[in-house]
């Protein structure tokens, strides 16, 4: 009952970007007319087709189908052997379905690129460039980076020169260029240099750059110095011709006025002193009378006390977002690859990281996409999208906020990911795994 299958070739080899075919024979071992459905199982199913996918066979009859393998020419399919299976499902007897197994060998291909950023820099003492080595092939490539200075006018230094670039990734190197000679004034000098990436299996790849060396003294310094000297001369002439005589005349008039004012003040002080003397004499007479009255049996009166008032202030909001317990945590995503860019998977803060009665205050965010996934990532507060970016735009990206982001229990922090193309080495699992790290504080009780 059911079906038997056989592959004409169980071991195949294919170059990425090209196709190879294999024939599979299907026999109806049952006693009834049966319909058989063929499909592919294994890691090669994304780039493998079978035709026809459905065939109807009389009892004891044979049918032939073609299996076509077409791996894409990119880093999503690593070089090496990929097992596959052609499954034949019987409609009349599904329990006796069969699978024909084989192996397709994906041949390696190389696609190495070298980029220098910026190609031209300007400096007075030192310039910094970035070297980017991209591996768009399907296997790791060891690379040696060499600098060259044809005119021997620069000191070129790499932070490291040997590296292994994984498929579908980029390696970054920092290059410092320091001119041997300096000059105070003069025209800009153009100093060319080159960078070469070599691998034992590839021809050398070259990139050229230029350092534009400028004079040590800024070009604006001499005009500013001349203008300042001219302004000083003009101010000196104005001082001796106009300002100084005017100041002297004004000083004499001010002296006269001050002397008159001082004389008037002295006369007023004399009058006030005489009035105070009269008042003191009157007070002395009153005091003598009070003493006489007390001697006659009189007594002093009672005394009172003033009462003060105290007040208090209170924060009406109940939460101070500038203080609180430090907190940091990481949200790691595990999004399924989907063709529709509008479909998102949501990921929450790890359980137990944020207490239910606390307000989360975020001051720092680090976005990480080390595998080179392609898609969209959103940071949300409740239903509001605070930040949205494409995964292909970054590998590591950090933000620091002067005005922090505040998340309350009714508007929690979530991460949404729409995954279109997982990066290496995830295409086999169909998962995108970017992550976001957060740092901040916990304040409480929660506002609202």
Image (cartoon, rainbow, N blue to C red):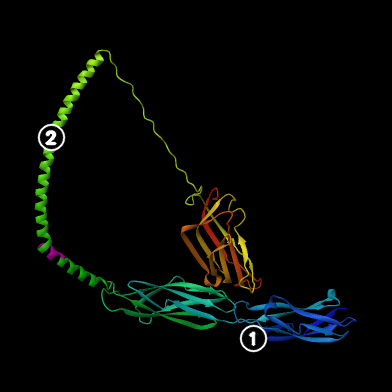
Camera-side residue of 5 and 448: 448
Q: Which residues are magenta?
A: 235-240
Camera-side residue of 317 and 307: 307
Above or below: residue 293 compared with residue 126:
above
Disc assigned to residue 18? 1
Of callouts 2 and 1, the N-terminal one: 1
Q: Is residue 246 magenta?
A: no
Where is residue 403 shown, x and y percent of the image? 46, 58
Q: Is residue 418 left or right of residue 277?
A: right
Q: CA distance from mark 2 to mark 1?
A: 117 Å
Where is residue 187 shown, x and y percent of the image? 28, 79
Could you tell me which residue is drawn at 56 percent across and 54 percent down? 408
Q: Is residue 82 left or right of residue 136?
A: right
Q: Is residue 26 left or right of residue 337?
A: right
Q: Main secondary structure of the magenta part?
A: helix
Could you tell me which residue is drawn at 11 percent across and 55 percent down? 250
Q: Which residue is mark 2?
A: 271
**Disc 2: CA contacts within 10 A as few (<14), some (14-19) or many (>=20):** few
Disc assigned to residue 148? none
Could you tell me which residue is drawn at 45 percent across and 77 percent down? 116
Q: Secondary structure at mark 2?
A: helix
Q: From the viewer's perspective, is the residue at label 2 or at label 1 nearer? A: 2
**Disc 1: CA contacts within 10 A as few (<14), some (14-19) or many (>=20):** few
Q: Is residue 146 visible?
A: yes
Camera-side residue of 400 and 97: 400
């Amino acid at each position: 009952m059911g079906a038997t299958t056989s592959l004409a070739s169980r071991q195949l080899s294919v170059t990425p970007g090209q196709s190879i075919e294999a024939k599979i024979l299907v026999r109806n071992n049952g006693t009834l007319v049966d319909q058989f459905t063929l499909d592919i199982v294994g890691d090669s199913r994304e780039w493998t087709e079978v035709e026809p996918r459905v065939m109807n066979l009389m009892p004891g009859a044979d049918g032939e189908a073609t299996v076509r393998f077409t791996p894409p020419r990119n880093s999503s399919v690593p070089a090496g052997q990929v097992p596959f299976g052609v499954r034949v499902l019987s409609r009349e007897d599904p329990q006796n379905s069969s699978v024909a197994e084989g192996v397709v060998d994906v041949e390696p291909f190389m696609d190495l690129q070298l980029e220098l950023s910026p190609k031209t820099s300007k400096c007075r003492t030192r310039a910094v460039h970035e070297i980017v080595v991209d591996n768009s092939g399907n296997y790791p490539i060891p690379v040696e980076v060499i600098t060259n200075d044809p005119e021997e006018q620069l000191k070129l230094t790499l932070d490291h020169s040997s590296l292994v670039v994984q498929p579908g990734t980029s390696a970054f190197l920092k290059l410092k260029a320091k001119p041997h000679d300096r000059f105070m004034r003069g025209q800009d000098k153009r100093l060319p240099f080159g960078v070469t990436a070599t691998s034992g299996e590839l021809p050398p790849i070259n990139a050229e750059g230029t350092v534009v060396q400028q004079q040590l003294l800024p070009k604006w310094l001499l005009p500013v110095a001349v203008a300042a000297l001219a302004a000083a001369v003009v101010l000196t002439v104005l001082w001796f011709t106009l300002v100084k005589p005017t100041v002297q005349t004004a000083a004499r008039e001010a002296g006269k006025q001050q002397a008159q004012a001082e004389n008037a003040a002295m006369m007023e002080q004399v009058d006030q002193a005489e009035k105070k003397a009269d008042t003191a004499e009157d007070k002395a007479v009153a005091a003598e009378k009070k003493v006489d009255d007390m001697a006659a049996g009189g007594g002093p009166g009672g005394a009172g006390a003033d009462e003060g008032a105290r007040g208090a202030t209170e924060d009406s909001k109940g939460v101070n977002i500038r203080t609180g317990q430090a907190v940091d945590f990481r949200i790691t995503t595990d999004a399924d690859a989907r063709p529709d860019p509008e479909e998102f998977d949501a990921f929450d803060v790890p359980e137990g990281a944020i207490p239910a009665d606390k307000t989360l205050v975020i001051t720092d965010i680090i976005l990480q996409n080390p595998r080179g996934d392609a898609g969209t990532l959103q940071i949300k507060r409740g239903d509001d999208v605070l930040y949205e970016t494409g995964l292909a735009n970054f590998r590591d990206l950090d933000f620091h906020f002067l005005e922090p982001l505040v998340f309350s229990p009714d508007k929690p922090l979530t991460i949404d990911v729409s995954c279109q193309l997982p990066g290496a080495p995830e295409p086999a699992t169909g998962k995108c795994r970017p992550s976001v790290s957060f740092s901040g504080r916990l304040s409480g009780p929660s506002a609202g």
